[in-house]
Image (cartoon, rainbow, N blue to C red):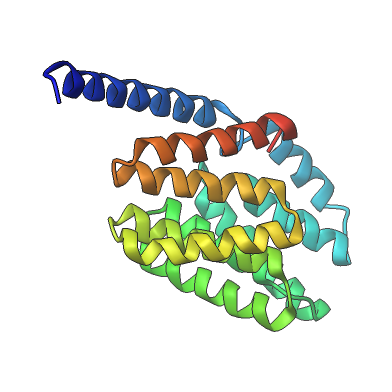
Amino acid sequence: MTLLQPLCCRSGLRLVTVRVSFILAVLVAFPAGAQNISKIDSLRTLLASTQGEKKLVLLNELAWECRSAFPDSTIRYAQLALDLSDHLGQSNSKTLNYLGLAHYYKGNLVRAYEYYEQAGRQARSSGDSTELAYSQNNIGRLFSEQGMLTQSYPYFVRAESLFQFVRDSSGLAYVYQSFANLYKQEKDFVRSEQRYRQALDIRKQLGNP
């Protein structure tokens, strides 16, 4: 190997790292995690005149929209949704996932894990593959962000398989980004870039993931 070859390798690695950082910045710019205040206000207005299953849908939508900027509001709406879903005799795995997200954004990772686990159990018992996939991805993210990469990987694999099974493109974008973050932590920038691009392509196709 000549002296030029390792320099080229390092240059190539820097280039891939720059591309990964750029794609990540683009993904963050998408409105997936943004809080749409006007939408929240509209949902609150509709909630006042809605009952039954439609009210449950609105409560869950509010819980989702408030999750990162207003996690306490998510907890409040999700608790109301849990009470209503029990009254209606419906599965509450989605609501439990949202409660997990709220506690995640509040920094209470133990409570987040507990709710994700509950969501997974409820989803299994009700046959809800979509919410089971989200619970697996959410748990995997908790492990990954704590540096427990070996533990997180199987959760992402299961989430990807389930999202593919139910053909949930939005869910796939989330799990592809989870894989990308994991590979980035492992400094496997080639695979990280591949997964980021998969997530970005899906979000471009969806327009508003």
**Residue furthest toward the top?**
4
Residue 131: give x, y in percent of width and height. 66, 65
Q: Say which residue appears at 76% left-offset and 72% top-offset.
A: 84
Asked if residue 111 lies left or right of residue 13, the reply is right
Looking at the image, residue 192 lies above or below residue 77 = above
Residue 194: give x, y in percent of width and height. 49, 37
Q: Say which residue appears at 72% left-offset and 53% top-offset.
A: 168
Quadrant in the picture for the C terminus:
top right
Along the line of sight, the residue nearer the viewer: 72 or 6: 6
Residue 166: give x, y in percent of width and height. 75, 60
Looking at the image, residue 32 lies above or below residue 13 = below
**Residue furthest toward the front?**
1
Does the rendering let one see residue 87?
Answer: yes
Along the line of sight, the residue nearer the viewer: 170 or 7: 7
Image quadrant in which you'd find residue 188 = top left
Along the line of sight, the residue nearer the viewer: 146 or 72: 146
Q: Say which residue appears at 55% left-offset and 51% top-offset.
A: 175
Residue 189: give x, y in percent of width and height. 36, 36
Quadrant in the picture for the N terminus:
top left
Does the rendering let one see residue 66?
Answer: no
Q: Say which residue appears at 86% left-offset and 65% top-offset.
A: 53
Looking at the image, residue 28 lies above or below residue 137 = above
Asked if residue 67 lies left or right of residue 50, the reply is left
Looking at the image, residue 158 lies above or below residue 183 = below
Tally the marks. Answer: 0
